[in-house]
Amino acid sequence: MSDFAKQYTKTTPRSKTSTLVAALRILANDVQSQDGVANAALYEASERMHELSKQRDALIAAMTGAATKLEADGDEWHVAAELREAIASVKGGEA
């Protein structure tokens, strides 16, 4: 990492994931690459980041719902099973 990048990351607040995804998509279109590999890599990175963000949001919602149920009725086994199912549905096919 360059000195500029190190300093920038220390002094600049983190951007929203949606902002990074949008910036990567713009770069994927604007970068001049003879073989298109850089463009494809940037676009794929933006899509993966977007998908991971959606999965994270779904997992947080599932865990929040499970925690709420645990607090309400104390049925740990039932809630744990529901949480495992929710995580499995969000996990998808690719690790």
Image (spheres, grey):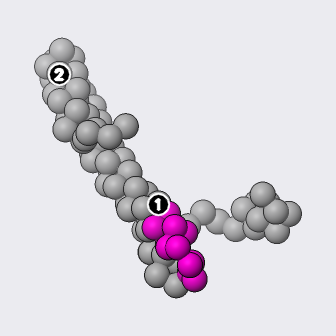
Q: Position of residue 83 (x, y in %)?
A: 22, 29
Q: Is residue 42 above or below residue 72?
A: below
The answer to whether one can see residue 24 in this image is no
Screen quadrant of the N terminus: bottom right
Residues in magenta, as a range = 31-41
The answer to whether one can see residue 6 in this image is yes
Asked where in the image residue 94 lies, by quadrant, the reply is top left
- Relative placement, left or right, of 28 versus 64 is right
**Residue in the image at 76% along x and 65% along y:** 5
**Amino acid type, callout 1:** Ala
**Residue in the image at 18% along x and 15% along y:** 77
**Residue in the image at 82% along x and 68% along y:** 4
Numbered mark located on residue 45 in the image: 1
Q: Position of residue 49 (x, y in %)?
A: 43, 57
> Farthest top residue?
77
**Element on which disc 1 rests:** helix
Q: Is residue 73 above or below residue 38?
A: above
Question: Would you say residue 3 sits in the magenta stretch?
Answer: no
Quick one: label 2, few (<14), some, or many (20+) residues within 10 Å? few
- Relative placement, left or right, of 30 versus 8 is left
Screen quadrant of the C terminus: top left
**Residue in the image at 17% along x and 21% along y:** 81
Q: Disc 2 marks which residue?
A: 81
**Amino acid type, callout 2:** Ala
Between 29 and 35, which is closer to the camera in this rendering?
35
**Element on which disc 2 rests:** helix
